[in-house]
Image (cartoon, rainbow, N blue to C red):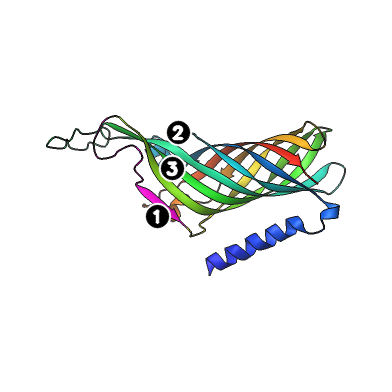
Amino acid sequence: MKKSVSVVVIVLLASSLFVNAQERNFGVVGGINYGNIRGDRAESINSSWRLAYHFGIFSNISLSDRIALEPRILFSSKGYDDEIDFDELNFAPIDGPTIPQNRVNYTSRNNYLSVPVLLKYKLVNNLSLDLGPEIAFLLHSKDIITKVDREGFYAKGDVPNEGSGDFFLDYGAMAGVTYYFTDDASIQLNYFHGLSNLHRKNPIGDSTENNSVIQLSLGYLIF
């Protein structure tokens, strides 16, 4: 039921972008994400910022000379990098020929269908202040080992966790600024502050985990 409702929401939002094209401006957008997590779990692990990407389409709907509405539909990759220190975890040495590992690095890749809706206020002719909500549906998640210090329990390329297809909902607030090079081309810097507890999917006590993403985008109006 929840998945069906999510699909309906996406269809309605997508339809709203493509009706009355003669009265609106449409474009393509893409750029980089710099993601991490906040919350109790972030304090208990060695998480660090992960470089990823986003791309999609947007519509710029003028409401007045200074105010516009900009909904977007994006494929957006979020997540974080992490390091497991087995010495800190006090793992017992492995008997036999296998050498125990001390440290393992991995990245958590979480790919979303994101729908931010930004209210844009023009401060001057080529600069606007942007603020609005974002909802995102998890399409696929994967934890992948990126580095090992030596042979042991994990090997580079191992995938300890992977999942997809459940449309797990994330939501939060986005704020930033847009600089317009021309009427058609712009660069935008945003920060996404996740409010949804990602650990409610696999709860561990009262642990909390929220997305935190710095997003740099290039946008271009097509028609």
- Among the two numbered marks 3 and 1 on one chain, the one whose residue lies closer to the N terminus: 3
As helix, strand or loop, the secondary structure at mark 1 comes to loop
The Cα atoms of the two marked residues, 2 and 1, are separated by 21 Å
Circles 3 and 1: CB atoms closer than 8 Å: no
At 85% from the left and 53% from the top, the residue drawn is 23
Q: Left or right: 144 with respect to 54?
A: left
In the image, residue 118 lies at what x, y percent?
71, 46
Picture layout, residue 58 above or below residue 107: below
Query: Magenta region: which residues?
Result: 150-164
Q: Which residue is mark 2?
A: 48
The residue labelled by disc 3 is: 108
Q: Position of residue 188 (x, y in %)?
A: 69, 35
Q: Nearer the viewer, mark 3 or mark 1?
A: 3
For label 2, the crowd category at 10 Å Cα-Cα, with few meaning under 14, some 14 to 19 and many 20 or more, is: some
Specify the quadrant of the image occupied by residue 190.
top right
- Taking the magenta stretch, the answer to whether it contains residue 163 is yes
Q: Nearer the viewer, residue 171 or 115?
A: 115
Overall secondary structure of the magenta stretch? loop
* Quarter residue 101 falls in: top left
Name the residue beneath numbered marker 1.
202
